[in-house]
Amino acid sequence: MLACRRHGVFYSLMAEEPTITTKPEDLYPDERFKEMVEAGVFYGRKRSKTHPRMKQFILTTRNEIEIVNLAKTVEMLERAGAFLKDTLRGPAAVALFAGTQPPAVEGTRKAAGEFSFPFVVTRWLGGTLTNYRVISKRIEYFKTLRKDFESGALEQKYTKKERLGFERELARFKELLGGLETLNGLPDVLIMIDPTIHTTAIREARRLKIPIVALTNTDSNPDEIDYPVPGNTKARTSINWFLEKIAEAIREGKQAPVDVPEDGAEEVPA
């Protein structure tokens, strides 16, 4: 029933005189659009919250809710996908995922985990990128502390009270740094859900010229994002749809052959 209602809401906007007999597949035969409608990708924010720069991605407004133009979503997703395929080729290329709102946590962890990429799903620590040298030391300390705790090494050196303190410290580090254990340097790209709640991450990435790919709702400024993909950032189904498509692009990039120069070959200067 939910899917039917979504079809009715969106497809009625695409036809000047919709009728009861009009079928969604007749209005939009492309399977990608059907997936997006089912996932609720087309729902934007309230009109009063619309960022002026996002108007180019809005189809219309219904009951004060902006309706995202899914044709633009497909266009921008293909652009972002092509970039990711090219940028994340080879085993050394790394993307950092950020999705800290509750509907994005599970999907973000799953998408990043498939490629053993680092991720942030609690809160962004200031300096994660711009002060990486310090953050990396904390990550290494966290790894060592966890290893000692799991091996029982702490029991031989410290009292019960001291071990309890280490246990609390370990829990705090796990919450803040647990997803960053595979971050062994600055990432090649930052992938996020909803730029409006990741302003610090955006500022750090832009300062270091790290490209950003983001699912961007109608209240965001797309000019701050290198590869914005307009869509609903509040629904778990929409977020998961975006992350699945992003994962597909990364997968294709990782499977593509990497150009390696022949031994002894030297580049001739122009």
Image (spheres, rainbow, N blue to C red):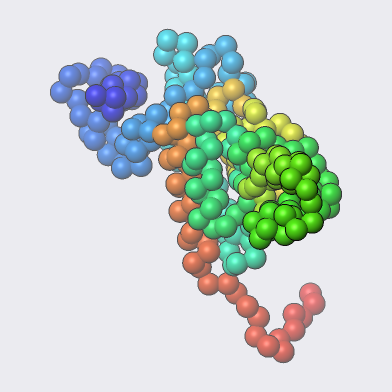
- Picture quarter containing residue 122? top right
On the question of residue 78 being in view, the answer is no
Question: Which residue in the rendered view is the most extreme toward the left?
Answer: 21
**Quarter of the image containing the N terminus?**
top left
| Residue under the image location 65 percent in, 85 percent down | 262
With 29 as the anchor, is 88 left or right in this view?
Answer: right
Is residue 93 shown above or below 203? below
With 177 as the anchor, is 20 left or right in this view?
Answer: left
| Residue under the image location 65 percent in, 65 percent down | 92
| Residue under the image location 68 percent in, 58 percent down | 152
Q: Nearer the viewer, residue 70 or 178?
A: 178
**Quarter of the image containing the C terminus?**
bottom right
Q: Nearer the viewer, residue 144 or 133?
A: 144
Count of numbered labels shown in the rendering: 0
- Give the x, y percent position of residue 217: 55, 28
On the question of residue 25 being in view, the answer is yes
Is residue 20 shown above or below 78? above
| Residue under the image location 78 percent in, 37 percent down | 126
- Picture quarter containing residue 259? bottom right
- Give the x, y percent position of residue 53: 62, 26
- Give the x, y percent position of residue 38: 33, 32
With 190 as the anchor, is 243 left or right in this view?
Answer: left
- Give the x, y percent position of residue 206: 75, 42
